[in-house]
Image (cartoon, rainbow, N blue to C red):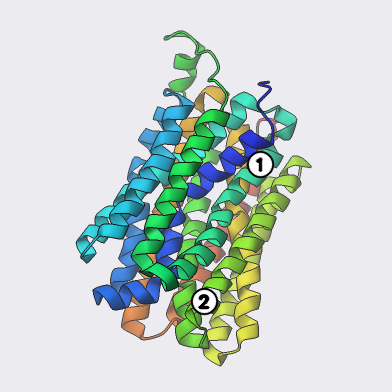
Amino acid sequence: MNNKSGPGLLFVLVCAMGAGPVMNYGLSATSTLIISDFGISEAQFGLLATVCFLSAALSAISLGRLSDRISGRAQLLLIFGGTALALVLMAVSRNYVWLLVAVALAGPAQAISNPTTNRVITHHVEPARRAGWLGIKQSGVQASQLFSSLFFPAAALLAGWRGSAAGAAVVMGALLLYSWNKLPADPPRLPAGGPTAVVGRQPFPPTVWLLAGFALLSGAGMQATNVYLPLFAQREVGFSLLLAGAAAAAAGVVGVASRILWGRRMARGTAVPVLLVTLAVGAIGGAGLLLAAGQTGWPVLLWSGVVLHGATVLGVNVVVMAAVLREVAPERVGAASGVVSLGMYAGFAAGPLAMGLLLQYSGGFLAGWIFVAGGYLLCVVLALVLHRMRLNARTPAGIS
């Protein structure tokens, strides 16, 4: 393996995973300011995340295939450069339509992050270390949540929410320069028409599509919670702007630890269906605690729900992505990751939109938390189906 496969490369992967979501987390952390500034409704605010994730979903499969063909540095340019461009447009947007355009530009940067980082791990990390690296690099998304939930509100108090977006764009530029120098050279490519072409024509295993379905349902609940958590904390429990941002940051901190933990559990051989059932059941409990916090106004229930949310549903991606690496040949890791990313980002798009509509037309968050918990319940069903498929397969090729 390449001698650059050390802490520097791992930091690049963490940053590559965290770059794309910065805008969404920043929007969430400054939601009250943006809603007030543009005079938009809660549903219109939810549409921002929906447009971003819909853009990611629509580009996921094509970008996944592209990641198997273009250089790693070109992909870093798409991730960091695309995010920086979107943040600059966010900073200078003067109406809601331009803000929608900005979030749409951020979508592809998120869509290619999993295929890019999974491909780097496949080519530059020893098989025994891959699950652990997956857990750490997936924690980049929650590191992004932590950064954005603290940086955007604090910067907004000094320079407004536009200034916070511009500052985040500068950070993306610095990370691009660092990552460009740290990424190892790409491995030699096989000749056209060789084994890669043959593998490329084969259909994906059914388990890949089942994992995509799990990613869709869990992703809907995950982003419905992430996007509206600060607004929920302020309106239903009486938190200040900074304290609500701290609640979202707390979910990010727990999410970082949980993704590393679940990655280690994968590395130790714990069965994927067992992990997915555990995560889905825990996520239902987290949604229930948030629901109860809204009904009672008790901060302790909100903090408990935030911790359980971070410990469970925020760890789903590392499990499904590690499973994908086991299911397909290295030459198709990018494409298969794109399929699962399609499901994930479709869920990311649907969740905030549904939560926003339920909030606007019901006047509270109760219906939204019931919607989130219902999606997690369906995740339990899919995990049990996956377990049944594994038992029926009775071959080493099944997910384990």
Q: How many numbered circles are shown?
A: 2
Left or right of residue 299: residue 29: left
Residue found at the far bottom of this picture: 296
Residue 390 numbered mark, or none: 1
Residue nearer the viewer, 119 or 338: 119
In the image, what residue occupies the spot 37% across and 56% down? 166
Please tell me whether residue 335 is drawn above or below residue 36 in the rendered image.
above
Q: Given contact means CB atoms under 8 Å apart, are the residues at marks 1 and 2 in contact? A: no
Front tag of 1 and 2: 2
Q: Quadrant of residue 298?
A: bottom right
Residue indicated by mark 2: 242
- Quadrant where the N terminus sits is top right
* Front residue of 163 and 267: 163
Residue 282, position in %: x, y?
65, 66
Q: Is residue 145 above or below residue 327?
A: below
Q: Which residue shows up at 41% across the image and 62% down it?
A: 164
The tag earlier along the polypeptide, 1 or 2, is: 2
Q: Is residue 246 left or right of residue 52?
A: right
Residue 162 placed where, x, y %? 34, 64
Q: Position of residue 72 (x, y in %)?
A: 48, 27
Identify the residue at image location x=25%, y=73%: 38
**Gap between marks 1 and 2 measured at Cα:** 46 Å
| Residue 221 visible in this rendered orientation of the protein | no
- Secondary element at tag 1: helix
Horizontal side of 180 relative to 274 (left or right) equals left
Label 2 crowd bin: few (<14), some (14–19), many (20+), radius 10 Å: some
- Kind of residue sitting beneath label 1: Arg
Q: Residue at x 49, y 69 (%)?
A: 154
Left/right of residue 131 with respect to residue 196 in the rendered view: right
Label 2 amino acid?
Leu
